[in-house]
Structure formats: structure tokens, C-alpha cells
Image: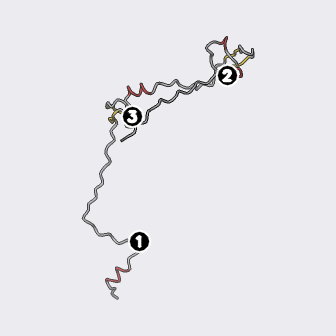
Amino acid sequence: MMTDPIDSQAETPEDEAPKPKKSGVLVQKHKPAPVSDIREKICATCGKPFQLAADQKYYDCPACYRKNHPVQKPQRKTGTQILIQIQCTACGATDVLDYMPPDPKQALCRSCFAEQKKLEPKPKPRPKPHVPFKRSR
């Protein structure tokens, strides 16, 4: 028995999708541009060009960065801590401080220091400069 050519096309398996017609557009994939190890940027502060490694993210050149971002002292990572025992000059109590006071003979305990801090007058805020209003005509 002979099958009709129209019927054979109708009985295509479901997993085979019909092939789309080729258009006149040719798509080419390019390789990504190679990442260079050194790149050049313009300093945000002084405007001079400077070079960076690919993994660095700075906006200032090294000279401006040193000026604007001073070196911070490293945090103490050891478990030991130096404690200084003082005698309060106001009440005579013995207290322990975790820093070296400028003058140990004039040091105050924590409670006397807090009382003295409350009694000190707070500095007055500076007044804002007066800017005259100009009318536009």
C-alpha cells in the first residue's frame, strides 16, 4: 500500500520541530576583548592620568589618595590589654583605666569624670552667615 506524500509529512514525530527558514542575516559571535592587566584612569581630584591593575578600584591617583586618606593605625588584635590603676583626685576611689592618662596624678575615676563632663558648658553653635536676598527683575 502506498502512502500519500502529504500524509507522510503530517505524521512527523512531535520532538522534531519544523526548521525555520533562513533569513539573509548572518550572525557572528566575537570573542570577548582581552582584559589587560593595567588600565589607565584620570584622577578625580587632580585630573592627571594614572595606571591601575585590573582588580583595583581607585578614583584618586596615589599622591592624592595619600593626601586625602591618611594612614589609620592598625587595631589591636592581641588578647592582652594594658590596664592602669589610678587613684581619683576628686573622691579618692581606686579605678582601673584601659589607657594611659596624660597626668596619672590628676586622673579622675569614671563617675567623677562623667560628673565633670555634665558640668562643663557645651560650646555654642556658630551662627550661620547672613546672605542677603536679591530680587530678580
Looking at the rendered image, the quarter that the C terminus falls into is top left
Label 1: element kind = loop
Disc 3: which residue: 59
Crowding near pointer 3: few (<14 within 10 Å), some, many (20+)?
some
Closer-to-camera residue (82/41): 41
Q: Which quarter of the figure has residue 76?
A: top right
Disc 2: which residue: 119
Q: Which quarter of the figure has residue 131?
A: top left
Q: Would residue 39 be found to the left or right of residue 121 on screen?
A: left
Disc 1: which residue: 15
Residue 100 x, y percent position in the rendering = 62, 16
Q: Amino acid at mark 2?
A: Leu
Label 2: element kind = helix
Looking at the rendered image, the quarter that the N terminus falls into is bottom left
Label 3: element kind = loop
Q: Amino acid at mark 3?
A: Tyr
Q: Are marks 1 and 2 in contact (CB under 8 Å)?
A: no
Marks 3 and 2, how far apart at CA = 46 Å
Residue at 61%, 14% (x, y): give it. 102
Residue 128 x, y percent position in the rendering = 50, 30
Scheme of colours in the image: secondary structure
Q: Are marks 3 and 1 in contact (CB under 8 Å)?
A: no
Residue 3 x, y percent position in the rendering = 34, 85
Q: Are marks 3 and 2 in contact (CB under 8 Å)?
A: no
Query: Where 20 sits versus 32, above or below?
Result: below
